[in-house]
Every structure is written in structure tokens, then in C-alpha cells.
Amino acid sequence: MTTARSTATDSAMPGQVTVPPFAVISGAQVQQALQGREPEIVDLVEATYRVHGAGDSVNPPSYFLRFPDRPTSRIIALPASIGGQVRVDGLKWISSFPQNVAAGIPRASAVLILNDHDTGYPFACLESSIISATRTAASAAAAADWLTRGRPRPTRVGFIGVGLIARYIHTFLAGTGWSFAEVGVHDLSADSAAGFRGYLEQSGTSSPIILHDSAEELIRSSDLVVFATVAGQPYISDVSWFDHHPVVLHVSLRDLAPEILLASTNVVDDVEHCLKADTSPHLVEKLTGNRDFLLGTLDDVMAGRVTVPRDGTVVFSPFGLGVLDLAVGKFVYDFFHELRRYG
Ligand SMILES: NC(=O)c1ccc[n+]([C@@H]2O[C@H](COP(=O)([O-])OP(=O)(O)OC[C@H]3O[C@@H](n4cnc5c(N)ncnc54)[C@H](O)[C@@H]3O)[C@@H](O)[C@H]2O)c1
């Protein structure tokens, strides 16, 4: 962590408002702070959902910057403020350039700015692609846990779209106690599938890895299905593929046609956020004119305000909340702050 901002705060009297020093935290440092702490981070994400669900947060709609000359690319601004124990404001600024992958670099890149609760001063700028992937995976692992509590624990996991996010989700599932009899993989790109297989082998998993040629085959042979593609519109509409009633982590949000959601129990992270930007839940709302297809949020499930049916397909569609980035970013900042304070 590097800090810069000369202040006159060292001699400040107790009770005086102080100007916090400014920290720049690199991707390598973020990774150092987060690696191997999956259970702690899932707890943090669950706590953040509870604070958000209780209304102690501000999370306005994300702002999408798009470009006429680069229609597949975008940069999203997620301003947010979270109360509770974390108490921090800030902004995530995350770009998605899918063409990057062919050039050998990740699709998404991001920074996170943290602003001090009392003074508004920005006190940290963190490389944030790892924070974003981490909070996304932690949220998926929390959902996998809570949404399967009333039914036999899934043993066959299947990943559709196996880029960076799928790797993080697998790491978080494994790091929070899941083990699988088999791991299914389906990707339109043979390179991605091979890369994911390499990652799985290195991760030390003992589960057999099965590459599937079609989404149908993968879905039919998985009881926990993870979507992490970059599909812009639904391409799966056959309800019979889900006859065995899997739990689906629909992290990429736009893979499933309304028919699938209408035949499932639907849980989201935040209703207002998720029913935007032509996500699959948003398409259902446009089609039916109502939100009756939603059971509630993951926070509703955790608090017992709603009950997930023991049988039937369950689909979790998380829009991805800026408050989660703040919570994980503050966790990283505190990690280095504590290290410095105690040598
Ligand atoms: N909901 C959230 O909170 C959240 C947060 C972060 C990322 N995401 C989403 O997760 C997705 C994955 O992100 P990533 O960084 O891993 O992307 P990535 O580009 O690294 O990987 C995506 C993979 O999906 C594959 N793919 C694309 N279309 C496919 C299809 N129809 N069938 C099978 N495979 C397909 C690609 O070949 C690629 O390997 C993105 O859509 C991103 O927006 C969601």
C-alpha cells in the first residue's frame, strides 16, 4: 500500500476532524488480502446484504457508459454508501471490453474509490477487478448455501461460461466446504474450457471434470448450475432441460428466457436493481407486467421472511451491488491498515 497526502493531522487533538491519508492499493496487494479467506468474505457479504436489506445503505442505479463505435464494450459506475460496521461511501468504476479476452487479457478491469464517512475525503483507490470477482463469487457461494438448505446438497456442479468469474465462484464454493462428485464445464470457446480445466486441476480438486458440448447436456447433468457467460440475450428457453429441478446461479443475468424463470422460484439480490437493463428478470416483468414471479431477495431468504420450496427449480439472479464492493474494499483497506499499525 502506498500512501500520499501530507496532512497536519499527526498533531490533531482528540475530537478534531482529521484528513485521512490516501492509499493506493494494487491488484497484487488486494489478492494478498483476500486469498484464502473465503468463509470470512462470505460472512461479510451476507452481513452487507442484511445491512442493505435493513435500509442502512444508499445504492443508486448503476450508470452505464456505452460507445457507438464499440457497441460490445461498456464502463459502469456504481456509487454507493453502506452503514452498519463498515460505514463507508465510494464508487466502483468497472469496464467490460469482451474483445480483451482474445488478446489474452481479462475482459473486466476496475478501480474502487473509498470515501471517508465523516469528511467525504477519498482515502483509498484500490485495483478492483479482484474485489469485484471476489464479491460476486462470495455472493454466489452464499446463495448456493442458503438456497439449498431445505433439499439434498447438490453434488454435481456445472459451469456454463468459464472465464474469470466461474473460476472465482468455484474457488469460493470449494473454500466454503463444497465438494463435488463431478464438475461439468460448457463454454463456446474451447480455449476457455481448456483454461478452466487447467485451473481445476491446479486447484487440487479430486472431482472428475466433464466437458459438455451443449448447454442442454450440462444442465441435465448438474444439480447446481452456474451461468457466467457474456450472453447479451437469452438463448435457453426449453423448460424440460430443468425437469430435475436444479438450483441455478444466474450470475450473467441474461442467459435464461422468461419461460424458464416463470417455471422457477426466483430470488434476486435487490429487486429494483435486478429489474433493469434487460436482465432475464426484467424481461419477465416486461412480459407479464408484474413482479409476481419473484419470491424475494437473498436477504429475505436469510431472514426467514420467505421460504424456498424444497422442490422445484430455483434461480438466483444477482445484479451485483456497489455496497458489496465497498464492504470488500474496506476489508482490504483495513487489512493493510492493521498490518501497518501493529508492524
Ligand atoms: N451479477 C454480478 O454481480 C456479476 C459480477 C461480475 C460479473 N458478472 C458477469 O459474469 C459474466 C462472466 O464474467 P467473466 O469476467 O468471467 O467473463 P469472461 O469473458 O472472462 O468469460 C465469459 C466466458 O463465457 C463464454 N461464453 C460466452 N457466451 C457463452 C454461451 N452462450 N455459452 C457458453 N459460454 C459462453 C466465453 O467464451 C467466456 O469463456 C459476465 O456476464 C459478467 O457481466 C456478473
Image (cartoon, rainbow, N blue to C red):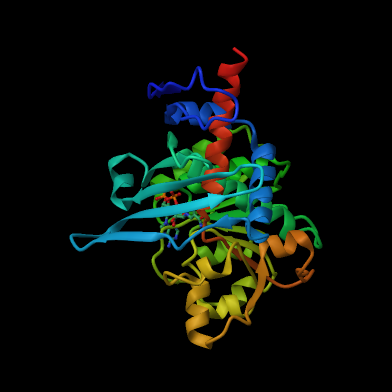
Horizontal side, residue 253 vs residue 267: left or right:
left
The structure residue drawn at horizontal position 61% and vertical position 46%, both measured from the top left corner, is: 138
Q: Where is residue 187 in the image (x, y as percent from the top left)?
A: 45, 54
The structure residue drawn at horizontal position 75% and vertical position 68%, both measured from the top left corner, is: 308
Q: Can residue 222 be seen in this view?
A: no
User: Which one is nearer the viewer's eye here, 174 or 124?
Assistant: 124
Which quadrant would the C terminus be assigned to in this image? top right
Horizontal side, residue 310 vs residue 201: left or right:
right
Q: Position of residue 110 (x, y in %)?
A: 39, 43
The structure residue drawn at horizontal position 52% and vertical position 22%, both measured from the top left corner, is: 12
Q: Where is residue 96 in the image (x, y as percent from the top left)?
A: 35, 51
Question: Image quarter for residue 50?
Answer: bottom right
User: Which one is nearer the viewer's eye here, 179 or 324?
Assistant: 324
Horizontal side, residue 340 vs residue 309: left or right:
left
Which quadrant would the N terminus be assigned to in this image? top left
User: Which one is nearer the viewer's eye here, 236 or 298?
Assistant: 298
Horizontal side, residue 98 vs residue 311: left or right:
left
Residue farthest toward the left in the current orientation of the protein? 69
Q: How many marks?
A: 0
Residue farthest toward the top in the current orientation of the protein? 343
The structure residue drawn at horizontal position 50% and vertical position 47%, both measured from the top left corner, is: 165
In the image, residue 177 above or below residue 335: below
In the image, residue 43 above or below residue 155: above
In the image, residue 129 above or below residue 221: above
Q: Can residue 209 be seen in this view?
A: yes
Q: Position of residue 250 (x, y in %)?
A: 55, 62
In the image, residue 159 above or below residue 233: above
Quadrant assignment for ligand 1 = bottom left
